[in-house]
Image (cartoon, rainbow, N blue to C red):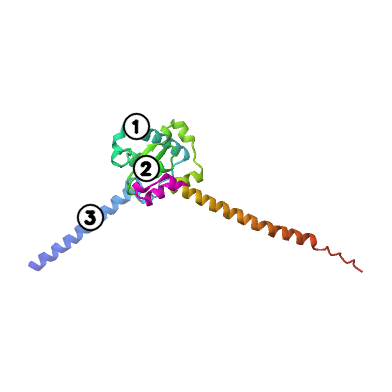
Amino acid sequence: LFFCAMDREAKRQKTWQRQLKAKAKAAKAVAASSGGPSSKAAAEPPGSRSQPTEAEIKEATQKAIAMIELGIKKNRGVQESGHRWIPLCWAKEMKPVLGSYKKFVEKCPHFRIEYGDTPEKYTVHLRNGGTSTAESSSLQPSTWQLDMQRAWDNYCLATAKEERSIADFVEMASTVANNALASKTGSESAAVPEKRRADAGAVAAPKRKKKKAS
């Protein structure tokens, strides 16, 4: 009798588990047909969000500039410790459109960055006292200006704060420019004789007369 009871209990457990699985399967089918959250999650794989449009980026940029400028002016003492001030809503509202806060302020001509002892320790400041949002949105720095900004940023990261010198940076930039100019001038000078020799050979070479067909 004991073993019979155990067998009946095992069969009852299997039947109950089959019923649960059937109910779960039916619920998924209903959710998929009604367009519920589970179907949307299955239809949209991770990272499939549409890219922001140019209009959305422009609007978000103007809003971000105004927000950061106002925040810096109102919270002047926040950055005295060497850490940047950042809008509380950046991660939720601005980051999906404009990307990370640091990259935005690095590229935006409205702001400048002062680096501390570590890459994550920096403060954000208004460039030239700040301009209007409309003027800032129309300012588009050229490629070489962005490269110079990156060069200065790399110099600050590689050099201790007490050892940084604008004069040293400018001197090195001047040396690099002079070397590049000299190299380009030398290449052009070497190419001129080659061209002259080629031209002289073309002039000296006699033209062959075509033979008349007999």
Mark 3, secondary structure of its residue? helix
Query: In what element is the residue under mark 1?
Result: helix
- Residue visible at 29% across and 52% down? 26
Q: How many marks?
A: 3
What range of the chain is rendered magenta?
152-170
Q: Residue at x 36, y 35 (%)?
A: 68
Judging by the rendered image, the residue that carries numbered circle 1 is 73
Q: Nearer the viewer, residue 110 or 156?
A: 156
* Residue 150 seen in this snapshot: no
Residue 174 at least partly seen: yes
- Looking at the picture, does residue 91 appear above or below residue 208? above
- Say which mark, if any, is on residue 20: 3
Q: Nearer the viewer, mark 1 or mark 2?
A: 2
Asked if residue 136 is among those painted magenta in the image, a careful observer would answer no
Q: Residue at x 41, y 49 (%)?
A: 155
x%, y% of residue 191? 66, 57
Q: Is residue 113 above or below residue 175?
A: above
Q: Nearer the viewer, residue 196 or 174?
A: 174
Residue at 44%, 49% in the rendered image: 151
**Mark whose residue sits in front, 3 or 1:** 1
Left or right of 10, for residue 95: right
Residue 5: horizontal and vertical position, in percent?
10, 64
CA–CA distance in space, label 1 to label 2: 16 Å
Give how far across and how far down residue 81 sits, in percent.
28, 41
- The type of residue carrying mark 2 is Glu
Which numbered disc, 3 or 1, marks the residue that appears first in the sequence? 3
